[in-house]
Image (spheres, helix red, strand yellow):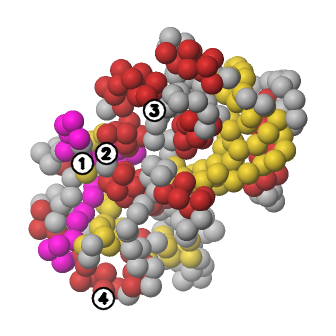
Amino acid sequence: MTENSEKSLNNTFVAKGLEREHNRRKDPDWLARKLNDPETFFMPIGQSKVLVVDGEAPAPVLLNPKEFARYKQTDSAIFLGERKGRAYFAVALDKNEFGAFEGAGQFRDLRAVAPLLSRDDGAILAYAQALTYWHSRNRFCGACGAKNEIREGGHSLACANPRCGAAHFPRTDPAIIVLIRCGEKCLLARQQTWAQGIYSVLAGFVEPGESIEAAVAREIFEEAGVRVGNIRYHSSQPWPFPCSLMLGFTADAEDDRITLGDSELEDARWFGRRELQEAVEKRAVKLPTPVSISYRLIEDWFDAEGATRLRDIWGRHARFDKKDWRS
Ligand SMILES: [Zn+2]
C-alpha cells in the first residue's frame, strides 16, 4: 500500500471493510433476497440528518427488515454494501417522515455528530448521506424532465420516458484543498461566513477542463495572490456536504506576499508552529473540525517538527465544543 493510501485511510469518512458488490447489486433477485434477509440493516437518513442512538458514544440506528417495515416500505431503499456478510441499505426520508422514527433514536446533523462516531459508522453514514442527497436532487430526468426510476440498488437512475431512456449515475464533485508552506510557516485563512475565530487551509472546486494541479495553482493565486510550486498529493476524503471528494495537497509558496483577491477570504496569515500553538491555546484561533481533511493537513504539518502534538492542544480546546457538534 502506498503512503498516500495509508494517509487516506486515516481520514474520517473513508470506508474500510465495506464490500460495495458492484456486480451483484445489478441482479434484482439478489437484491430482493438481501432486502428480506433478517440479517440486513436499514439506515434512515434525510436532509443531512442521520438517526442515531445518542449518548457519550453515539451509534447509528440499524433496523432489520421486520423492524423497518413498521415505519416505512423498502421499495426506495439504496444498497450500500456488505460488511461481514450483512447488507446495509440507506432509506431517504422526507422531513414529514422524521416523526415516525422518533421512538427509534434521535436525528442528528452528520457533520456535527461525526467526531463522536466510530470510524466505520461515520464512513457508512457519509456514504449513505452522499447517495441519498443525489437521489433527492435527481427525481426527474435532466434531459427530458420525465420521472427517474431506481436501478442497480440505487446506484443508477433510468428515465421512465421510453423515447428518452437516459441513464443517470451518482456525481462526485472534485475539490482541491491545500496546505501552503513558506519556510517554517503555513498559510491559514478564514472566510467571513465561518464561525468566529476559525482558520483553515485554502480550498476550491476543480473546474471543467482543468487538471487538479492547475486547480491548486489557480485557486491559491485567485484567493490569496500566492504563487505556488512543488505541488504534492497528500490524501483524499469523501465529504458528503453535499457531494464533494476532497483532494488534499501540500505546496510551497514562491514568497510570503499575500494579496486577498476575490471576496471569498476575510483574512489570510502565515503561522509558525509556536505562533499557532499560542493562538489556539488563547482561543484566538480555532481550527476546523477534527473530522476534516483540512485538520489532517494542518496536523501533519504541525506534528512534523517538535515534540508537541496538535491533537493535545486542539483536543483540550475541542472538548469545549463537543456540545456544539451534537446540534
Ligand atoms: Zn429523460
Taking the spot 26% from the left edge, 76% from the top edge, the residue there is: 85
- The C terminus lies in quadrant: top left
Pick whichever of labels 4 and 1 is earlier in the sequence. 4
Amino acid, disc 4 = Asp
Amino acid, disc 3 = Arg
Q: Return the x and y of residue 15 as percentages of the image width and height.
A: 42, 61
Mark in front: 3 vs 4: 3
Residue 29: mark in rendering: 4
Q: Secondary structure at mark 1?
A: strand
User: Magenta stretch?
Assistant: 36-57
Task: Determine whether label 2 and label 1 are within 8 Å by CB.
Answer: yes
Label 3 environment density (alpha carbons within 10 Å; few <14, some 14–19, many ≥20): some
Taking the spot 48% from the left edge, 52% from the top edge, the residue there is: 10
Q: CA distance from mark 1 to mark 3?
A: 23 Å
Pick whichever of labels 3 and 4 is earlier in the sequence. 4
Q: Is residue 55 above or below residue 81?
A: above
- The N terminus lies in quadrant: bottom right
Tell me if I can see residue 136 in this picture. no
Q: Return the x and y of residue 137 as percentages of the image width and height.
A: 50, 56
Mark 1 — residue?
A: 59
Q: Secondary structure at mark 3?
A: helix
